[in-house]
Amino acid sequence: MNARILTFSSEGDTTLIEYDPETADMEKVNKVIAEYEVKTGAQPFDLETGERIGKVTREHKEVLMVRPIAGG
Amino acid sequence: MSNLFVIVCLAATFAIAAAMLYRSLFDLVPTNEPSTDAQAEAEERAEKYLRRVIALTGATQIGRHYCVLDLGNARFEVHDSYVSRTPIGKDFREMAKAAGGTCFYIPNEHMPVSEKIATALLQLKNNPSLFEKWAAQAGAFKADGKQMNGVDSVPTQTRLKFRLRLLSSK
Protein backbone atom coordinates (compact mmCIF):
# COMPACT_ATOMS: atom_id res chain seq x y z
CA MET A 1 0.00 0.00 0.00
CA ASN A 2 1.26 3.45 -0.88
CA ALA A 3 1.94 6.14 1.72
CA ARG A 4 0.63 9.67 1.25
CA ILE A 5 1.47 13.18 2.40
CA LEU A 6 -1.79 15.12 2.53
CA THR A 7 -2.98 18.62 3.03
CA PHE A 8 -6.48 18.83 4.43
CA SER A 9 -8.87 21.21 2.80
CA SER A 10 -12.62 21.49 3.09
CA GLU A 11 -12.71 21.65 -0.72
CA GLY A 12 -11.00 18.27 -0.90
CA ASP A 13 -7.79 16.74 0.37
CA THR A 14 -4.75 17.37 -1.77
CA THR A 15 -2.04 14.75 -2.01
CA LEU A 16 1.34 16.47 -1.98
CA ILE A 17 3.20 13.27 -2.73
CA GLU A 18 2.29 9.58 -2.90
CA TYR A 19 5.02 6.95 -2.71
CA ASP A 20 5.78 3.32 -2.02
CA PRO A 21 7.31 3.33 1.50
CA GLU A 22 9.31 0.19 0.73
CA THR A 23 11.26 1.68 -2.14
CA ALA A 24 10.85 5.46 -2.00
CA ASP A 25 13.74 7.85 -1.54
CA MET A 26 12.78 9.27 1.88
CA GLU A 27 15.18 12.17 1.49
CA LYS A 28 13.16 13.28 -1.52
CA VAL A 29 9.88 12.89 0.42
CA ASN A 30 11.24 15.01 3.29
CA LYS A 31 12.48 17.59 0.79
CA VAL A 32 8.95 17.99 -0.62
CA ILE A 33 7.65 18.45 2.95
CA ALA A 34 10.36 20.99 3.78
CA GLU A 35 9.58 23.02 0.66
CA TYR A 36 5.86 23.03 1.50
CA GLU A 37 6.67 24.10 5.06
CA VAL A 38 8.74 27.03 3.84
CA LYS A 39 5.88 28.11 1.56
CA THR A 40 2.94 27.71 3.99
CA GLY A 41 4.31 27.17 7.51
CA ALA A 42 2.40 23.85 7.69
CA GLN A 43 4.13 20.98 9.52
CA PRO A 44 3.67 17.20 9.23
CA PHE A 45 1.51 15.21 11.68
CA ASP A 46 1.05 11.44 11.74
CA LEU A 47 -2.63 10.73 11.02
CA GLU A 48 -2.45 7.43 12.91
CA THR A 49 -1.22 8.85 16.23
CA GLY A 50 -1.96 12.58 15.95
CA GLU A 51 1.67 13.41 16.74
CA ARG A 52 3.90 15.92 15.02
CA ILE A 53 6.65 14.33 12.95
CA GLY A 54 10.18 15.69 12.83
CA LYS A 55 11.20 13.58 9.87
CA VAL A 56 8.99 11.25 7.85
CA THR A 57 10.17 7.62 7.85
CA ARG A 58 9.04 4.48 6.03
CA GLU A 59 6.77 3.61 9.00
CA HIS A 60 4.52 6.62 8.42
CA LYS A 61 1.61 5.74 6.18
CA GLU A 62 -0.52 8.86 6.21
CA VAL A 63 0.88 12.27 7.02
CA LEU A 64 -1.13 15.47 7.26
CA MET A 65 0.33 18.92 6.87
CA VAL A 66 -1.17 21.12 9.61
CA ARG A 67 -1.30 24.91 9.18
CA PRO A 68 0.23 27.42 11.61
CA ILE A 69 -1.92 29.39 14.05
CA ALA A 70 -1.64 33.04 15.05
CA GLY A 71 -2.94 34.78 18.15
CA GLY A 72 -5.31 37.61 17.43
CA MET B 1 -65.07 37.43 -11.05
CA SER B 2 -63.34 40.06 -13.20
CA ASN B 3 -62.35 41.91 -10.01
CA LEU B 4 -60.69 38.76 -8.72
CA PHE B 5 -58.81 38.42 -12.02
CA VAL B 6 -57.56 42.01 -11.77
CA ILE B 7 -56.43 41.45 -8.17
CA VAL B 8 -54.54 38.28 -9.12
CA CYS B 9 -52.87 40.08 -12.07
CA LEU B 10 -51.88 43.02 -9.85
CA ALA B 11 -50.47 40.69 -7.20
CA ALA B 12 -48.43 38.78 -9.80
CA THR B 13 -47.10 42.03 -11.31
CA PHE B 14 -46.17 43.29 -7.86
CA ALA B 15 -44.36 40.03 -7.01
CA ILE B 16 -42.37 40.11 -10.27
CA ALA B 17 -41.43 43.78 -9.75
CA ALA B 18 -40.34 43.05 -6.18
CA ALA B 19 -38.21 40.10 -7.32
CA MET B 20 -36.56 42.21 -10.05
CA LEU B 21 -35.86 45.02 -7.58
CA TYR B 22 -34.34 42.55 -5.10
CA ARG B 23 -32.09 41.06 -7.81
CA SER B 24 -30.94 44.46 -9.03
CA LEU B 25 -30.12 45.54 -5.48
CA PHE B 26 -28.40 42.42 -4.18
CA ASP B 27 -27.02 40.64 -7.23
CA LEU B 28 -24.92 43.56 -8.42
CA VAL B 29 -22.07 42.72 -6.07
CA PRO B 30 -20.42 39.50 -7.24
CA THR B 31 -19.55 37.11 -4.43
CA ASN B 32 -16.95 34.39 -4.37
CA GLU B 33 -18.84 32.40 -1.78
CA PRO B 34 -19.41 28.77 -2.71
CA SER B 35 -22.90 27.54 -3.51
CA THR B 36 -24.96 26.07 -0.69
CA ASP B 37 -24.31 22.48 -1.81
CA ALA B 38 -20.55 22.99 -2.03
CA GLN B 39 -20.57 24.77 1.32
CA ALA B 40 -22.51 21.94 2.97
CA GLU B 41 -20.11 19.38 1.49
CA ALA B 42 -17.10 21.38 2.72
CA GLU B 43 -18.56 21.60 6.22
CA GLU B 44 -19.33 17.89 6.28
CA ARG B 45 -15.76 17.10 5.24
CA ALA B 46 -14.41 19.42 7.94
CA GLU B 47 -16.63 17.77 10.56
CA LYS B 48 -15.33 14.32 9.60
CA TYR B 49 -11.80 15.68 9.97
CA LEU B 50 -12.68 17.11 13.39
CA ARG B 51 -14.13 13.76 14.55
CA ARG B 52 -10.90 12.04 13.51
CA VAL B 53 -8.78 14.61 15.34
CA ILE B 54 -10.99 14.31 18.46
CA ALA B 55 -10.38 10.54 18.46
CA LEU B 56 -6.62 11.08 18.09
CA THR B 57 -6.27 13.76 20.75
CA GLY B 58 -8.71 12.39 23.31
CA ALA B 59 -10.69 15.62 23.31
CA THR B 60 -14.42 15.78 24.03
CA GLN B 61 -16.85 17.54 21.76
CA ILE B 62 -19.45 19.61 23.57
CA GLY B 63 -22.06 20.93 21.20
CA ARG B 64 -21.26 21.45 17.56
CA HIS B 65 -18.50 24.03 17.71
CA TYR B 66 -16.81 23.59 21.04
CA CYS B 67 -14.32 20.98 22.32
CA VAL B 68 -12.61 20.32 25.64
CA LEU B 69 -9.06 18.97 25.85
CA ASP B 70 -7.46 18.01 29.17
CA LEU B 71 -3.66 18.11 29.12
CA GLY B 72 -1.76 17.50 32.35
CA ASN B 73 -3.21 19.88 34.91
CA ALA B 74 -4.86 22.22 32.42
CA ARG B 75 -8.19 22.14 30.65
CA PHE B 76 -8.40 23.83 27.25
CA GLU B 77 -11.77 24.82 25.87
CA VAL B 78 -11.40 25.26 22.14
CA HIS B 79 -13.95 27.26 20.18
CA ASP B 80 -13.62 28.22 16.50
CA SER B 81 -11.44 31.26 17.16
CA TYR B 82 -11.02 31.35 20.92
CA VAL B 83 -9.25 29.07 23.44
CA SER B 84 -9.54 29.30 27.20
CA ARG B 85 -7.29 27.54 29.70
CA THR B 86 -8.29 26.58 33.24
CA PRO B 87 -6.00 24.82 35.69
CA ILE B 88 -7.36 21.55 37.08
CA GLY B 89 -7.02 20.42 40.67
CA LYS B 90 -6.50 23.80 42.32
CA ASP B 91 -8.79 25.66 44.66
CA PHE B 92 -11.22 28.15 43.19
CA ARG B 93 -9.15 31.30 43.90
CA GLU B 94 -5.97 29.89 42.37
CA MET B 95 -7.96 28.63 39.39
CA ALA B 96 -9.49 32.05 38.84
CA LYS B 97 -6.04 33.70 39.00
CA ALA B 98 -4.39 31.32 36.56
CA ALA B 99 -7.29 30.99 34.12
CA GLY B 100 -7.13 32.87 30.84
CA GLY B 101 -8.03 32.85 27.21
CA THR B 102 -6.87 34.00 23.83
CA CYS B 103 -8.28 34.51 20.39
CA PHE B 104 -6.57 32.70 17.54
CA TYR B 105 -6.84 32.52 13.80
CA ILE B 106 -5.43 30.46 11.01
CA PRO B 107 -4.05 32.45 8.10
CA ASN B 108 -6.81 31.15 5.82
CA GLU B 109 -10.04 32.99 6.30
CA HIS B 110 -12.23 30.57 4.34
CA MET B 111 -11.63 27.65 6.67
CA PRO B 112 -14.78 26.00 8.15
CA VAL B 113 -15.25 26.19 11.93
CA SER B 114 -14.68 22.44 12.50
CA GLU B 115 -11.37 22.59 10.63
CA LYS B 116 -10.17 25.51 12.77
CA ILE B 117 -11.02 23.63 15.97
CA ALA B 118 -9.33 20.45 14.69
CA THR B 119 -6.15 22.36 13.81
CA ALA B 120 -6.02 24.01 17.24
CA LEU B 121 -6.64 20.68 19.02
CA LEU B 122 -3.84 18.91 17.14
CA GLN B 123 -1.38 21.69 17.85
CA LEU B 124 -2.28 22.12 21.54
CA LYS B 125 -2.08 18.36 22.14
CA ASN B 126 1.47 18.33 20.75
CA ASN B 127 2.63 21.64 22.16
CA PRO B 128 0.47 23.17 24.95
CA SER B 129 2.94 26.08 25.31
CA LEU B 130 1.62 27.43 22.00
CA PHE B 131 -1.27 28.85 24.06
CA GLU B 132 1.05 31.49 25.58
CA LYS B 133 2.43 32.39 22.15
CA TRP B 134 -1.05 32.91 20.71
CA ALA B 135 -1.96 34.99 23.77
CA ALA B 136 1.12 37.17 23.22
CA GLN B 137 -0.25 38.05 19.74
CA ALA B 138 3.22 37.94 18.25
CA GLY B 139 2.27 36.58 14.83
CA ALA B 140 1.75 33.08 13.47
CA PHE B 141 3.48 30.03 14.97
CA LYS B 142 4.19 26.68 13.42
CA ALA B 143 3.24 23.52 15.33
CA ASP B 144 6.79 23.24 16.73
CA GLY B 145 6.50 26.74 18.26
CA LYS B 146 8.74 28.49 15.73
CA GLN B 147 7.51 31.83 14.50
CA MET B 148 6.40 32.10 10.89
CA ASN B 149 7.60 35.20 9.09
CA GLY B 150 5.33 37.44 7.09
CA VAL B 151 2.08 36.87 8.99
CA ASP B 152 0.69 39.67 11.13
CA SER B 153 -0.79 38.99 14.53
CA VAL B 154 -4.15 40.46 13.56
CA PRO B 155 -5.93 39.39 10.36
CA THR B 156 -6.49 41.96 7.59
CA GLN B 157 -10.28 41.92 8.05
CA THR B 158 -9.95 42.80 11.73
CA ARG B 159 -7.46 45.57 10.97
CA LEU B 160 -9.80 46.95 8.30
CA LYS B 161 -12.74 46.91 10.71
CA PHE B 162 -10.61 48.69 13.32
CA ARG B 163 -9.56 51.38 10.81
CA LEU B 164 -13.17 51.88 9.73
CA ARG B 165 -14.17 52.25 13.36
CA LEU B 166 -11.42 54.85 13.86
CA LEU B 167 -12.53 56.78 10.77
CA SER B 168 -16.16 56.77 11.82
CA SER B 169 -15.26 58.02 15.30
CA LYS B 170 -13.41 61.06 13.87
Image (cartoon, grey):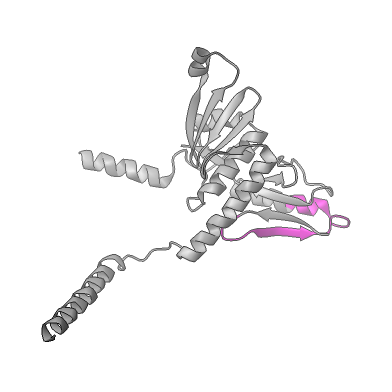
Q: Residue at the spot x=77%, y=43% of the render?
A: A55
> In the depicted view, which residue is nearer to us: A35 or B7?
B7
Q: Is residue B43 magenta?
A: no
Q: Is residue A66 visible?
A: no
> In the depicted view, which residue is nearer to us: A14 or B2?
B2
Residue most extreme to the bottom:
B2
Residue most extreme to the front:
B1
In the rendered image, the vertical position of residue B38 relative to residue B58, given as above or below: below
Q: Residue at the spot x=61%, y=34% of the render?
A: B124
Residue B48: give x, y in percent of width and height: 62, 52
Quick check: A27 left or right of B166? right
Q: Which residues are magenta?
A: A9-31
In the rendered image, the vertical position of residue B13 relative to residue B21, given as above or below: below
Q: Quadrant of the C terminus of chain B?
A: top left
Residue A71: give x, y in percent of width and height: 50, 36
Quick check: A50 left or right of B9? right
Q: Residue at the spot x=35%, y=46% of the render?
A: B160
Instruction: Identify the image quadrant of residue A6.
Output: bottom right
Q: Residue at the spot x=65%, y=32% of the render?
A: B127
Instruction: Identify the image quadrant of residue B147.
Output: top right
Residue B77: give x, y in percent of width and height: 54, 33
Q: Quadrant of the N terminus of chain B?
A: bottom left
Q: Is residue A32 visible?
A: yes
Residue most extreme to the left:
B3
